[in-house]
Structures are given as structure tokens and as C-alpha cells.
Image: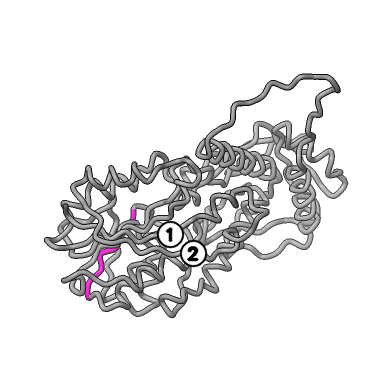
């Protein structure tokens, strides 16, 4: 992947500097300047707001504190405009609930994107061996090696915010994520979505297997391999798990081996379906049909429901006679006004499929019960479903 990373250049202390730009979610800033502990937070906020990247040269922990201070300034509510006395404000026609939900979601995504862009302009330069020449800097070489690959002899530069994400991903990979439905832990890699929402896995663990599924099942878009491992634990003798992302393929392969399922699960590189037909074809596509702001978000956001529609369109020709396709979906997009239930049912019918049964559950993640969450109105109504689909 090194050859795909662009170079970024800047001048510092009268000398040119050059490093590889390391980010999978943002473009490099238009200009860079060094910054250290003497830079006030207000001045730093002005610079990053103008598009300047700050190459941090001070104490590492002070850099983290600056990032927190910038975050507070980014999150500060904008001033509201109060009309002058006697001013007539035009009345706005009342919007329907779907429009209000879409507008709230659009504001939320715009806020997220702005926050990521501004905070992503506090930068760290890394030595060729992935160390940092900063006071009190931690040893992050293992996290960077996992995300970027082995050192290639070049200096690198990345945002402090992204570095924190790499460190977090390293800890997730090392410690693993407890999956109650599996009775074990899954170890996600950097860039591979972690199975933190256990309610959909409980549905897969409990739904009755269709006839013949004990012999073969397909897991489409396997990610960490958690669904493939769960099917193997349920007694499916052969599971073919597919993904296009090399990281996901390596991550899933490692997880199924760690769980003792390597003889049952074959992880292959494929765009959606492997060749052939199976009595059970499972897919957990991204749930929200809108563009992702970062690479890791592609597991959640799917523009125009592309993966969902591809799964439905191709399911029929990959189902064995009498087989079932299991589609795991949240209806959050419906509550956000981004997709309707009628659209979903029409895509199912147009693909020559029928709904055999639907198993529903409520999400248990913290945001579902947090009134302070910007999307609480939608999240509080969310239902996660396992749609069992068969040939019409």
C-alpha cells in the first residue's frame, strides 16, 4: 500500500521537509506550519479553521490537550440570531416527519464532517521506524505496523486524531470484542468494522436453519468473520465467507482459525457471491444509504443502498432449491427518511423473492436510549430485523 500514499512537503526552519501523507479518510491540508506548547488554543483554532495543518513539535500529551481544546471550540453551539423587535419572520410551512428526519440527519453528518476536518489538521510526524520524536511520546510502532505495514524507510505524517484511532484499533485487535452469541471474542483489525452491536448476532444464533443448511452456507461481506464463525458454531459443516477488502479477508481468516473453525470456514476474495448455490446465504449489508465520510464508515453507510440491492438482485441465482437468504437490517434508514419500507418490499419482490418470516429485536447500544444524541428521535424507534427470504 505504500506506493498509494502521496507525499506532502512543507518548509520548516528555512529547510524543506517531506513525508508520506497517511490517511484513508482526509486530504492533506493546503499548507502546513510547525506548532508547539506556546501556541494558544484560540490561535490554533483560527489556523485550522482557515485550512492550515499544524505539525506538532511540542510535548505529546500537551498535543492531546490541544486537540481536546479544539474539540470544545468545534462543538460550541453557534450563536442564535434574535430578530429585532417588530421584525416579521416569514412562517415556514410545516414539514412532514420524513423531511424533518432527513434534515436532522444531514445536519448531524455535516457537523461530523466539519469536526473531523478541523481536528484532523493537528498533525504528527513519524520517523522512518514509526517512532515519534516528541517529549513523552508513547511507543506506537505496533499500532502503526498493523495499520500501515512494516516501515519502508520514509518519514510519515498523519493527524493526531487518526493516530488515536489507530491506537484504539490496536487495543481492540489485541483484547478482542466479547460476542455473547458466539461465547467467545472476535479480534477486529484496523479498518474492519467491529461487531459491537450484538442484537443482530443474537438473531442469527436463534433463527431456525433452513433444510440443508447444515451442509453449506454463504456469508456475504464477512468483515471480521463473526457471522461465519457463528454459523460454524451452529453446526454448519462448510461456510464460504466472502469479502473484497484484503484486511477483512486476513482478519476473518485469523479469527476463524483462533476460534477453531478453520476446517469449516473458507474465506475467499469475491465481489458479493461465491460460485454456486447454497441452502443458506447470509448478508449484513450497511444499513444507512448515504455516502461515508471515512473508509471505516463503509460498513455502516452504503450510497443508494448499493450492496443491499446487489444482494437481493443476485440472491435468487445463488440459493439452492428451498433455501433461504438471511438479510440482517436495521430500519434506522426508514426513521431517518432515507428509505421507505415500501422500497424495501418492492426490491424484494422485483428480485423474485418473498418474505418467509421476519425476526425483530430492539437495539441495546447506549445511543438508543440517550435523549442527548442528535438522532435520538430515530434511534428510539429503531428495530433490527433478520429477514428470511425465499424464492417467490
Q: Earlier in the sequence, mark 2 or mark 1?
A: 2
Residue 321 on the magenta span = no
Asked which quadrant contains residue 60, the reply is bottom right
Instruction: Specify few, some or many for label 1: CA neighbours under 10 Å numbering under 14, 14-19, or 20 or more.
Output: some
Kindly tell me whether residue 7 is visible in this rendering. no
Horizontal and vertical percent for residue 128?
A: 60, 54
Q: Secondary structure at mark 2?
A: loop
- Residue shown at 67% from the left, 24% from the top: 91
Mark in front: 2 vs 1: 1
Residue 242 on the magenta span = yes
Q: Is residue 381 left or right of residue 237?
A: right
- Residue shown at 65% from the left, 39% from the top: 114
Horizontal and vertical percent for residue 340?
A: 40, 43
Q: Is residue 257 left or right of residue 10?
A: left
- Residue shown at 34% from the left, 73% from the top: 206
Horizontal and vertical percent for residue 53?
A: 70, 39
Q: Is residue 2 left or right of residue 91?
A: left
Q: Are marks 2 and 1 in contact (CB under 8 Å)?
A: yes
Residue named by callout 1: 384
Residue 274, compared with residue 206, is above or below; it is above
- Residue shown at 62% from the left, 52% from the top: 162
Instruction: Specify few, some or many for label 2: CA neighbours under 10 Å numbering under 14, 14-19, or 20 or more.
Output: few
* Chain part drawn in magenta: 237-243
Q: Nearer the viewer, residue 131 or 158?
A: 158
Q: Which mark is residue 197?
A: 2
Q: Residue furthest left?
A: 321
**Gap between marks 2 and 1, in whole Å?**
10 Å
Asked which quadrant contains residue 115, the reply is top right
Q: Main secondary structure of the magenta part?
A: strand
Q: Secondary structure at mark 1?
A: strand
Amino acid at each position: 500500500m505504500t506506493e498509494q500514499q502521496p507525499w506532502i512537503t512543507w518548509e520548516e526552519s528555512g529547510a524543506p521537509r517531506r513525508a508520506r501523507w497517511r490517511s484513508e479518510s482526509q486530504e492533506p491540508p493546503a499548507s502546513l506550519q510547525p506548532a508547539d506548547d506556546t501556541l494558544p488554543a484560540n490561535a490554533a483554532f483560527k489556523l485550522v479553521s482557515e485550512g492550515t495543518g499544524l505539525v506538532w513539535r511540542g510535548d505529546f500529551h500537551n498535543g492531546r490537550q490541544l486537540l481536546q481544546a479544539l474539540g470544545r471550540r468545534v462543538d460550541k453551539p453557534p450563536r442564535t440570531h434574535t430578530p429585532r423587535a417588530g421584525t416579521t419572520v416569514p412562517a415556514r410551512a410545516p414539514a412532514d416527519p420524513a423531511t424533518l428526519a432527513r434534515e436532522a440527519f444531514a445536519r448531524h453528518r455535516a457537523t461530523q464532517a466539519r469536526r473531523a476536518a478541523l481536528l484532523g489538521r493537528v498533525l504528527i510526524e513519524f520517523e522512518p521506524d514509526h517512532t515519534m520524536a516528541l517529549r513523552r511520546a508513547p511507543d506506537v510502532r505496533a499500532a502503526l505496523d498493523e495499520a500501515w505495514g512494516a516501515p519502508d524507510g520514509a518519514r510519515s505524517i498523519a493527524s493526531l486524531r487518526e493516530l488515536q484511532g489507530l491506537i484504539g484499533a490496536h487495543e481492540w485487535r489485541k483484547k478482542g470484542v466479547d460476542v455473547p452469541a458466539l461465547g467467545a471474542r472476535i479480534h477486529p483489525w484496523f479498518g474492519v468494522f467491529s461487531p459491537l452491536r450484538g442484537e443482530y448476532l443474537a438473531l442469527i444464533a436463534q433463527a431456525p436453519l433452513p433444510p440443508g443448511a447444515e451442509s453449506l452456507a454463504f456469508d456475504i461481506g464477512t468483515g471480521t468473520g463473526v457471522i461465519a464463525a457463528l454459523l460454524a458454531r451452529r453446526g454448519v459443516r462448510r461456510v464460504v465467507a466472502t469479502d473484497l477488502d484484503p484486511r477483512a479477508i486476513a482478519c476473518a481468516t485469523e479469527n476463524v482459525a483462533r476460534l477453531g473453525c478453520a476446517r469449516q470456514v473458507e474465506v475467499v476474495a469475491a465481489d458479493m457471491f461465491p460460485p454456486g448455490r447454497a441452502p443458506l446465504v447470509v448478508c449484513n449489508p450497511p444499513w444507512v444509504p448515504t455516502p461515508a465520510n471515512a473508509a471505516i464508515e463503509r460498513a455502516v453507510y452504503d450510497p443508494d443502498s448499493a450492496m443491499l440491492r446487489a444482494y437481493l438482485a443476485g440472491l435468487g441465482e445463488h440459493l439452492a432449491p428451498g433455501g433461504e437468504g438471511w438479510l440482517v437490517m436495521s430500519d434506522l434508514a426508514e426513521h431517518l427518511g432515507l428509505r421507505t419500507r415500501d422500497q424495501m418490499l418492492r426490491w424484494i419482490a422485483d428480485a423474485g423473492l418473498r418474505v418467509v418470516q421476519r425476526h425483530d429485536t430492539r437495539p441495546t447500544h447506549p445511543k438508543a436510549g440517550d435523549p442527548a444524541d442528535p438522532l435520538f428521535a430515530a434511534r428510539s424507534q429503531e428495530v433490527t430485523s433478520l429477514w428470511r427470504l425465499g424464492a417467490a
